Amino acid sequence: MSTIEENPEGGDGAARRRRRRRTGSADGDEEEAAAASIEREFDGKPVPAWTEQLTVRAFAVSLLLGVMFSVIVMKLNLTTGVIPSLNVSAGLLGFFFVKTWTAALARAGLLRRPFTRQENTVIQTCVVATSGIAFSGGFGSYLFAMSETIAKQSTEANYAQNIKNPKLGWMIGFLFVVSFLGLFSLVPMRKIMIIDYKLIYPSGTATAHLINSFHTPSGAKLAKKQVKMLGKFFVCSFLWGFFQWFYTAGDNCGFASFPTLGLEAYQNKFYFDFSATYVGVGMICPYLVNVSVLLGGILSWGIMWPLIDAKKGSWYPADLPKTSLHGLQGYRVFIAIALILGDGLYNFFKVFGKTIIALVSQIKNKNSANALGVSDDTSAYDTSPVSFDDQRRTQLFLSDQIPKPIAYGGYIAVAVISIVTIPHIYPQLKWYHVLVSYIFAPVLAFCNAYGAGLTDWSLASTYGKLAIFIIGAWAGASHGGVLAGLAACGVMMSIVSTASDLMQDFKTGYLTLASPRSMFISQVIGTAMGCVIAPSVFWLFLNAFKDIGVPGSEYPSPNALVYRNMAVLGVEGFSSLPKHCLTLCFVFFAAAIVINAIRDVVGEKIARFIPLPMAMAIPFYLGSYFAIDMCVGSLILLIWQKINKAKADAFGPAVASGLICGDGIWTLPQSVLALAKVNPPICMKFLSRSMNEKVDAYIASLS
């Protein structure tokens, strides 16, 4: 999956570097340590019991925000598949809604319980769990890849046993039986990961710092200003989406089809499409990601595809339709797959190797400490002094234990239900395929969660792609191997993704003194909400927009075709590729590995100028229009930082979140208008001079 989630240069990398600069000296004096203490600021405030952290208002706000962010993630999934971190938005909006709620009750004299950072953490956890299903549910990847719409674009393995069209009932049922397993798989490991090994979990740590800052006097004041800024740009973005709608009465109409760089560039997917969403995404994503996407678009649509198109009639038949994978479309899709697989496998083995090395080192250090007679304390092999913050956090983190029988029993119970149920949903995926997946799943979930704790990289979609090839080949072409591989991808991706997310949430809870029990229950409730909300939102999209998944449409769902063709490759091999496509795939697969290796060898200072293969692969199939939007967002942020860096750093994420949320939420009323058959009144289309003369002449002839 081409998401920022798997990007090694994500926004949290910068956060890690800032943290290292702040804590670069290991022997700062005690006064500095005391001044930096977070928990001393909250020392006089009692920590609510875990049952008091789970409030009705928290889950009411979580439900509202869960729907909002599910719509946004679904839109991103179905347009490009680039999904930035929305944690800042969730944290800000959760704080704003509950703070507004409690302020109104306080003025009426009805406030019984103040809003705490623990409750804020519960909201954050629940919202992220809910919207996370919109990604791991595969609505823009493996699940939609099973549909007839996507199968028609791939001439191989498109017979009935490899097709399953989306239906609301079976989608909800499938998500319920696969999404909870990951939550139970790593619960017994939480103390080892968070306290013993002291894994960083940069996203969880950054979220905790954000929530802690909201509940200090100065932080609360800044948070109110940030929410106000987010609200302004939310309204502007929503109204801009509404305004654009009036001009989209036909195909290729409206501002989204504005040939800003000329008609020739427009034909090759180079234009600015006035998308507030992707301008906001560009402001959140690191500069390197945005530049890499643009470079990928220039390399593919600016150089390679015109050259390959010139070979029409030689490399592939000239009379093929544009969507045929035996023609130019095949080169676009399979070379993008080669880049994605090369990047994904390199990072998989890299993170896996780091995980094993770090794990062995931790175990050796602990054994050495025990051999020297050091007490077997949770930090026996950590010689650094224990701070006041760590003492308080560890004490509360260990006080509310989640009973191990619940974790083990829950995993076994859900696994048994899944093994029995999934073959009824997907007859091509046999019970023994699911059983083998569940035997290996906890190990893979641990590796992914440990790697995420070290590097902030979640390789959930890479594990899913491996399942496509392994289970698909095992099932075989004659037994629906394509559908079996895609279903197995969903099983594996859901487990490792939710396990990693839960451990990130435990880290956030550890740093905000939220109980592990409230974190776990919040994750469970959020996951349950997501299992209903995400399929319902997808079903709304399917019914409102009839051309979802069609190349060139508003929602082309590019990753669905990529995943479908990965499954076809795993089952049927390379015989279906057009001429010289396999050679080019090998070249780009190797190039992805070499570029990543060079980035690791040259060091961080030089690596920030070397593009990311995963990001470069995204426009190979889609084009560069969204990359131009993202680069415009980067340029806005860069200029803002040059003018006033402090203000840009404080309010940039809020502005970006407002742009993304406003444009994303406009999709809801747009869907309602489409279902009510209310069509836009105007078509704004751009023609060349010669075409315009022909149109004028035709109209004149009619009159």
Image (cartoon, rainbow, N blue to C red):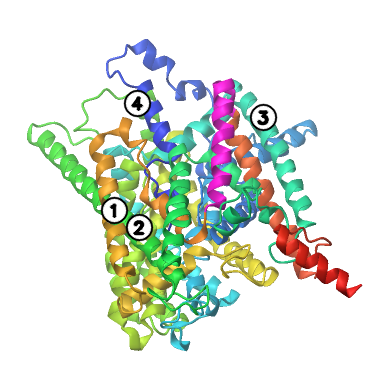
User: Which residue is pictured at 43% across the width and 15% down the height?
Assistant: 35
Asked if residue 625 lies in the magenta stretch, the reply is yes
Magenta: main secondary structure equals helix
| Callout in the foreground (2, 3) | 2
Q: Which range is magenta?
A: 624-650
Cα–Cα span, label 4 and label 3? 28 Å
Q: Are marks 2 and 1 in contact (CB under 8 Å)?
A: yes
Q: Residue furthest right?
A: 703
Report the amino acid beneath label 3: Lys
Nearer-the-camera pick, 280 or 700: 700
In the picture of the structure, the residue carrying the numbered disc 2 is 339
> Mark 1 vs mark 3: which is more N-terminal?
3
Asked if residue 404 lies in the magenta stretch, the reply is no
In the picture of the structure, the residue carrying the numbered disc 3 is 224
Side of 140 where 451 appears, left or right: left
Q: Dot 2: what SS? A: helix
Report the amino acid beneath label 2: Leu
> Mark 4 vs mark 2: which is more N-terminal?
4
Side of 383 where 507 appears, left or right: right
Callout 3 crowding tier (Cα within 10 Å): few <14, some 14–19, many ≥20: some
Cα–Cα span, label 2 and label 3? 43 Å
In the picture of the structure, the residue carrying the numbered disc 4 is 20
Q: Quadrant of residue 197?
A: top left
Callout 2 crowding tier (Cα within 10 Å): few <14, some 14–19, many ≥20: many
Whole-percent x, y for residue 670 in the image: 74, 60
Whole-percent x, y for residue 275 in the image: 64, 49
Callout 4 crowding tier (Cα within 10 Å): few <14, some 14–19, many ≥20: few
Whole-percent x, y for residue 560 in the image: 48, 68
